[in-house]
Amino acid sequence: MDILILGNGFDLAHGLKTTYMDFLNYCVGKNSKRLKGMINYGTTFIDNIWLRHFITTCNNYGKNWIDIEEEIYRVVLSLNKILKDMSGGDVEVIFPLTFSIQKDILNFDFNQIIDYLKTCNNRIETDEKKYTTIETNDFSHLYFYIDNYQGFINFIYDQLRAFVELFEKYLDETVMSEIDSEPKYQLSLLQESKPNIMKFLYVLNFNYTDTLTRLYEQTMDSRQKKSIRNFYVHGKINSNNMILGTQFYDNKNTVISPEFNVFRKHNQRHKYNTIEEYQNLLHIIKSPNDSTRRVFHVIGHSLDKSDAIILKHIFLAHQDSIINIYYHNEETQEKLINNITEIIGEEEVMEKVRFIYQHDLERGILIPQEEPVLVEN
């Protein structure tokens, strides 16, 4: 039984601009064009405060900053503390609140949100979400009115979900629409060494994209297509279930209000029902009716702590298993060694794990379609 575990490095290896940094750069470029000579352009995606915050954070930390999940956790910690400090522990006493953003300026930083929040003496009608958005007549500013504490949580979370929708639209309409139908690699697992044996391939996909299917479907025969089963643990584009949150709720010295749990990936997997994908695969791996050895093939996943719990369960679900981890350079290999050791422990790594250069012509998993041409001097 082969289980392919895909991370974003799989998409990057195929030249796809699927990182959050790619998306932020795309938004900055699009916004720069849109903001020139701004006249009554109305509400656009630049109104999203998470998008603005991530762009501002990128500007502050440099172009190599990419850890959006950790930043979401840092924002949650900050907001949790700010609201408690402002209220002396009783957060309801500070509401209602209002703050605004200027539409021709992209900057927004949750670190200074206390400077944005202003007590509002006038009650404004809200719906069941307990917040509302008001745009000025000249389209220059947006005002956000927050009725109560739950309204504040709803507003911040809905803004994050709006960011997810923008990212989903970018992946679908900008990235995947231009995907090359002729991949430069051959996925070695699709090459059956024993044609007479039906070989199932299970794919645990941590990406939102269906790159594997789109790129390699043409190289598969009908039997292979039927034998591949995909499990999208974080949701999939065009399915309205993409997960974006944080796993970093492990600081025992900090008490975070339970209302902020909607930002946890754990909660979102249940909320958007992607957990069943993981549970179904886990059940298959544990099945006593299949005596074949479980062989995991990890490609493009950093094995960092954000997905450590799921990976640990999967890797240790069956005692007799092998874990092939594919890397694209020595620096990445070193990080992967450290990360997998953190997840399953040194003894399990010694027994189960093998590190393989992903483009190796004999043992790699992404084999170049055209072998390199040797030129004699």
Image (cartoon, rainbow, N blue to C red):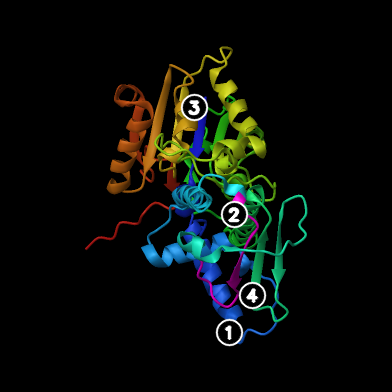
Q: Which mark is residue 283?
A: none
Q: Which residue is mark 2?
A: 94
- The answer to which of marks 1 and 3 sits earlier in the sequence is 1
Which residue is disc 4 drawn over?
141
Give the CA separation, mark 4 to mark 1. 16 Å
Q: How far across and how far down the image is residue 323, in percent?
A: 40, 29
C-alpha distance separating marks 1 and 2: 38 Å
The foreground one among 55 and 283 is 55
- Residue type (three-letter) at the residue carrying disc 4: His
Which amino acid lies under the numbered mark 1 shown in the image of this protein?
Answer: Lys
Residue at the (44%, 45%) spot, across then down: 300
Along the line of sight, the residue nearer the viewer: 353 or 46: 46
Residue segment shown in magenta: 93-108
User: Residue 185 magenta-drawn?
Assistant: no
Relative height, residue 332 to residue 139 (above, below): above
Q: Which residue is mark 3?
A: 314
Whether tag 1 and tag 3 are in contact, CB under 8 A, the answer is no
Q: CA distance from mark 4 to mark 3?
A: 48 Å
Image location (x, y in percent) of residue 133:
70, 64
Question: In the visual, does 315 lie left or right of 196?
Answer: left
**2 vs 4, front mark:** 2
Which numbered dot is residue 36?
A: 1
